[in-house]
Image: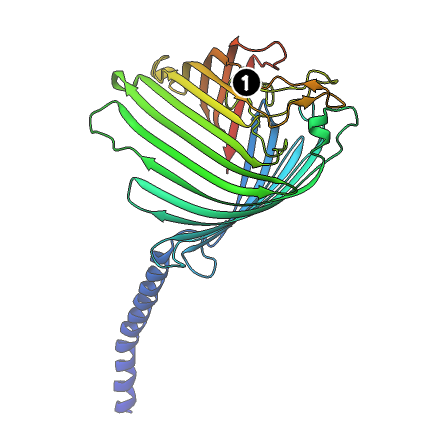
Amino acid sequence: MKRFVYGAALALLISPLALSAQTQGDEDDLAEVESLNPNPIARLTGRLAYDTDYGVVVGMGFVTDRLLGKDQTLEFNIETQEDGTRVNLRYNNDAIFGESPAFGMNVVRSETSASATYDFDSTVTRIEPRLTWEVSSALKASAYASYSVSDISGVPVASSALIVGDEGEETTSAIGANLEYRLPIEPGGTIRTARLRFGAEIGSTTPDNDFLRVTASGQAIHVFNDGNVVLRSQVRLGALSSQAGTSSIGDRYRLGQGSIRGFEFGGLGPRDLAVAGTPALGGNYYGIAKFDVQFPNAFGEQAERLTPGLFVDLGSLWGLDDVAGGIAGADIVDDASHLRSSVGVSLSIRTGLGAIQMYLAHPIASQDYDSTQTFGLELNHSF
């Protein structure tokens, strides 16, 4: 009997210590697991946006950074708007080759229907594996290969010969490289950020177009007067050079108010004036410069969510490999580099749904056939 009492007493004394040790061990294991990746296993995302180029954009997505390991990310997004749908699948693995390079794969499918700007339907499917090297804290380099299939359909019979000739399916294979360099920032200076980007791509498009595409851009942010004046500047350049054959409307650049405010999407650059609707043709070359001066504290602390500004945009979109326009190809299209520019006022409003960007623009250099746009509005909210 005494042995039973002593044993029971010893068990009552030991069991809390054992339970405490077990609980502490579980907490340590849990803390170790959570320290590997404190984020949720996966999450759903959404996007609600509006701008005067594309109208209302609604999107949803799924993202996880625990796909077969903490260094792998899988992201899926689908977005729809009035004239089209875009689906994007992105995969990244930062450690597949060790510390460097990081591997990524991007698959995009987009569909657009005929609109007032481009009166044809189009679909594009593109797959792009990519390697990225963090060369230093200031320099990042990447190399990629891409394969895409595009199709243009529903082109009106009476449209420009330069668009009718591009109807049908084409495939594009290309390899390219990009460099991004962040300039060093001196403490106490006015520059808050400065970045340069360069890209080059060489490829071939069926049936007969070999091309070289080169892009470059630079942007900087300066802050003056204790943060009361912010100057944002950027320059963008692009060139599509056909080494054999001619570029199609699906290959060429198309610009809008995101490049030069005061002009609609497809509202500047070469157009075929000899056919109904004077369709935009895009261009092989573009050069853009944008300057914004913003005044974050112009309305005082009572209206700190409001940031007014002034801007100047200028640039051009030009160049075609073939200028034989009109219905039968007998009318020459003007593809010269005519300057476009605009000035205006802007207002940014910070809200619970994200920043609302709006502007009033006045084109001061344009062509008579350009499609201009005085007012612009943009809202982008992700959740």
Does residue 352 appear anywhere in the picture?
Answer: no
Q: Residue at x 74, y 18 (%)?
A: 275
Q: Name the residue nearer the viewer: 100 or 227.
A: 100
Residue 41 in the image, given as x and y percentages of width and height:
47, 55
Q: Quadrant of residue 182?
A: top left
Q: Residue at x 61, y 14 (%)?
A: 370
Above or below for 351 versus 73: above
Q: Which residue is mark 1?
A: 376
- How packed mark 1 is, by other alpha carbons closer than 10 Å (few <14, some 14-19, many 20 or more), is many
Q: Name the residue nearer the viewer: 262 or 175.
A: 175
Type of amino acid at the residue the image marks with label 1: Gly
Q: Residue at x 59, y 14 (%)?
A: 372
Above or below for 166 versus 131: above
Does residue 295 appear anywhere in the picture?
Answer: yes
Q: Quadrant of residue 56?
A: top right
Q: Secondary structure at mark 1?
A: strand
Residue 198 in the image, given as x and y percentages of width and height:
40, 35
